[in-house]
Amino acid sequence: MDDAAKGLLGPAEERIRFFEEIGADFLVRPGPASSADAAGAGPRISSASGNAAELEALAAEISACRKCALADVRNRSVAGEGNPSARLMFVGEAPGADEDLRGIPFIGRAGKLLDRIIAAMGFDRQEVFIANILKCRPPNNRDPLPDEVRACSPYLLRQVEIIRPEVIVTLGKPATNFFYGRETAITVVHGRFFDFNGIQVMPTYHPAFLLRNERFKRDVWQDMRQVMAFLDKK
Ligand code: SF4
């Protein structure tokens, strides 16, 4: 097998490993995502350079932002990254220590797990867009405060408006509450689509929570299967 062929098998192998880890190897099935891997289909990168320019301008605005006290304690702001015309967007609550140092979202242990979930869904990281509600790290990774969410969330909403994804996956309670518009219990609402301004939102558990509670990986996978089914219908 040549190197190119080995490279094409990567996402499929990753998916199988993830299935096995969550005890769901019976979920290995042919489908559009697998066919795309087998065919070597590349990322569905947008040609919408206008979106990219708008997102870049917004990222510059974010890096200069001092609208809340987190500006005093951050190393770097973390605007978000990915396909400017992504069909699928992941939103967490705030950057952690690794992200704060490098200015890139979801790159620590939780980020590695998110990468595996994305690969298991048949996407790669460059095809989706990954962001947080807060663009700067709260001290000791505490939950975002209401004032911080009020100050920072317009940036996320502008990203959503520019990208217009078909599906937003909210990772954990703060991100879910934000789009839901009120307090929720992630154990109750995960796995159920709801509408946000015409965009389907799927709440699920945060990868950092999964690292501490492995048995919930199966729930997350069931939630992601619904997202895959929705996107495959398009
Ligand atoms: S968290 Fe948001 S509002 Fe606060 S300083 Fe950072 S970018 Fe600005």
Image (cartoon, grey):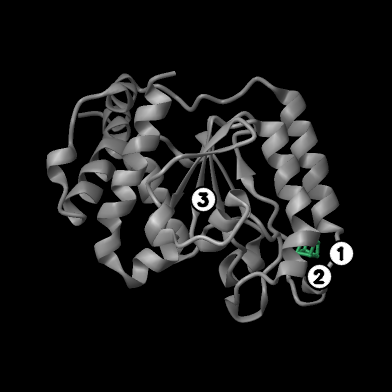
Circle 3 SS class = strand
- Residue for badge 2: 71
- Mark 1 / mark 3, whichever is N-terminal: 1
Q: Which residue is mark 3?
A: 170
In three-dimensional space, the C-alpha distance between marks 1 and 2, rounded to whole angstroms, equals 7 Å
x%, y% of residue 211? 35, 68
Residue 137 occupies which quadrant of the picture? bottom right
| Position of the C terminus by quadrant | top left
Give the amino acid type for the residue marked by disc 2 in the picture.
Answer: Ala
Q: Which comes sooner in the sequence, label 3 or label 2?
A: 2
- Which element carries disc 2, helix, strand or loop? helix
- The residue at the point 16 percent across, 48 percent down is 24
Q: Nearer the viewer, residue 208 or 49?
A: 208
Residue picked out by circle 1 = 67
Single out the mark in the foreground, 1 or 3. Answer: 3
Q: Amino acid at mark 3?
A: Thr
